Image (cartoon, rainbow, N blue to C red):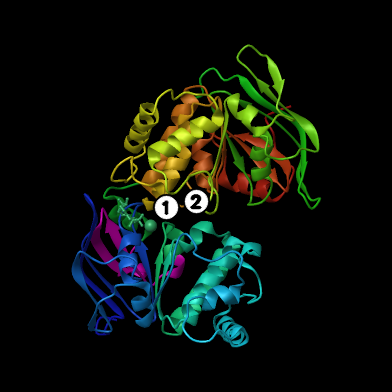
Amino acid sequence: MDNKIPAVTMRDITKRFGSTLANDKVWLNIYRGEILSLLGENGSGKTTLMNMLSGIYFPDEGEIQIDGKDVVIRSPKDAFDLGIGMIHQHFKLVDVLTAAENIVLGLPGRLDLKAAAQKIREICDAYGFEVDPEQKVYDMSVSQKQTVEIVKVLYRGADILILDEPTAVLTPQEIDKLFAVLRNMRDDGKAIVIITHKMHEVEALSDRVAILRHGQFIGDMPTKKTNAQEMTNMMVGHAVTLNIDRPEPVNPKPRIEVKGLTVRSMDGIIKLDDVSFTAYSGEILGIAGISGCGQKELLEAIAGLQPVEAGSISYIDDNGGREELIGKDPLSIQQMGVALSFVPEDRLGMGLVGNMDIGNNMMLRSYRSGRGIFTNRKAPYKLAHQMVDFLEIATPSVETPVRRLSGGNVQKVLVGREIANAPSVLLTAYAVRGLDINSSYLIYDTINSQKMRGVAVIYVGEDLDVLLELADRILVLCGGKVSGIVPGRGAKKRDVGLMMTKLGGKTDEQ
Ligand SMILES: Nc1ncnc2c1ncn2[C@@H]1O[C@H](COP(=O)(O)OP(=O)(O)O)[C@@H](O)[C@H]1O
Ligand SMILES: [Mg+2]
């Protein structure tokens, strides 16, 4: 590989945003016939660096060469003309148009949708994509939209492809499919850059890794010659092993009691089947289960966002007083101190206003909840400052519009806002979705500090290893039924895994 001319050479690339040094004299080579993983914590400058290849930003300093020739990339069109295509974290498709219309959108020349559909099918056949050219974007799953984005850049002749955290929004099965087509494209001689935080993906997919830290290039090496521990050390600058705090619950009391809860989806499918459990104050109850087995419906039912077919959900106050939550509207439930923080697949899609700054997004939340904890405009900004400090949100200021933050930092705002709202019950789903290791720990710390304040936390996550270290008890769902409730301390991954796939585990409740 050493004597091959790189498809892309970036030399001494520097980019500033105000006082933020997003890229600091970065060097990077990208080769054809190779998949390169670009690694780094949230805010380390990965997206910025790639945006300078795709023509979104222009470097303050440094040079770019394509196939050994100096180039100047001033616009996405310049990038396309050089064969560079980028699939962004937040898709840019037009909802009311079909796949084919989106793919040809903005191309010069007469619009021939028939010919376009034919060419799209050829691309799909060549690499193993499944796209229906006639399908409208609003009818598509996240993974289908992503596929359209990829086909779109291939259609325009891209042979240098950049994918910015493509797997953050996909299920494991969809990830396997994506990786298969990426390998096909690599074998076809394309140069591929993928940004991801997930070490097992890096190891499974890429030929080489390059690592950024605080905007600087730290190093690169063949994937075979390194390992997850070494890569993590290079990313964060110090050794990290999974070692999440689990303080003992203090004076736990029943807070939410669920009995015989049954929920059916709109199309009549049973999502929760006779689910019963109690969540205690000062405790983290983890919910384990394979994706789609009822976790989402469970949290939504408690938050009043899901029609319930049968059962009861009682809120129990400190004096043992009970109030039924089923039948209450979501706002009333929120006002009782039940906060739902659900990180959606599309992180910007829900709950934050991209054009507003962090402080205003704080205020928005407290207005909605109607609790009026902010009596003046200074308070939300003070809270915003505390959050920026505590969760180490990388932002020039609390006045920066949220849409300008990197994906992980947007998420810290989203999660931090719900947590800071001081609930008595915290329902949290996918709080660390797509976050790097350090940021994830900050979120675990925040959740733990809420637990120690006496909040009843119900935690839904994707990573079983985390659940086993963080949760006091683990409720395992399988196909909408409770297959068991086990203490988190001492629980074995293998046992919980088995309970996730078949019913009939042990339970510590009557
Ligand atoms: N348009 C922008 N305006 C101001 N700051 C920005 C902008 N884009 C990125 N940044 C800042 O630059 C740094 C690097 O961000 P980014 O490249 O998105 O990181 P990553 O993709 O590695 O998470 C962060 O501190 C981020 O807040
Ligand atoms: Mg990014």
Nearest the viewer among 413 and 373 is 373
Q: Quadrant of residue 339?
A: top right
Q: Earlier in the sequence, mark 2 or mark 1?
A: 2
Q: Is residue 120 left or right of residue 237?
A: right
Residue at the spot 39% in from the left edge and 81% down from the top edge: 33
How crowded pointer 2 is (Cα within 10 Å; few <14, some 14-19, many 20+) is rated as many
Closer to us: 344 or 81: 81
- Res 251 visible: yes
Residue occupying image coordinates x 48% and y 29%: 421
Question: What span is colored magenta in the figure?
Answer: 204-226
Ligand 2 is within 8 Å of the C-beta of the residue at disc 1: yes
Marking on residue 407: 1
Q: Nearer the viewer, residue 325 or 431?
A: 325
Q: What amino acid type should be assigned to the residue bearing mark 2?
A: Arg
Q: Is residue 207 magenta?
A: yes
Q: Residue at x 32, y 57 (%)?
A: 230
**Could you say whether the residue bearing mark 2 is in a helix, strand or loop?**
loop
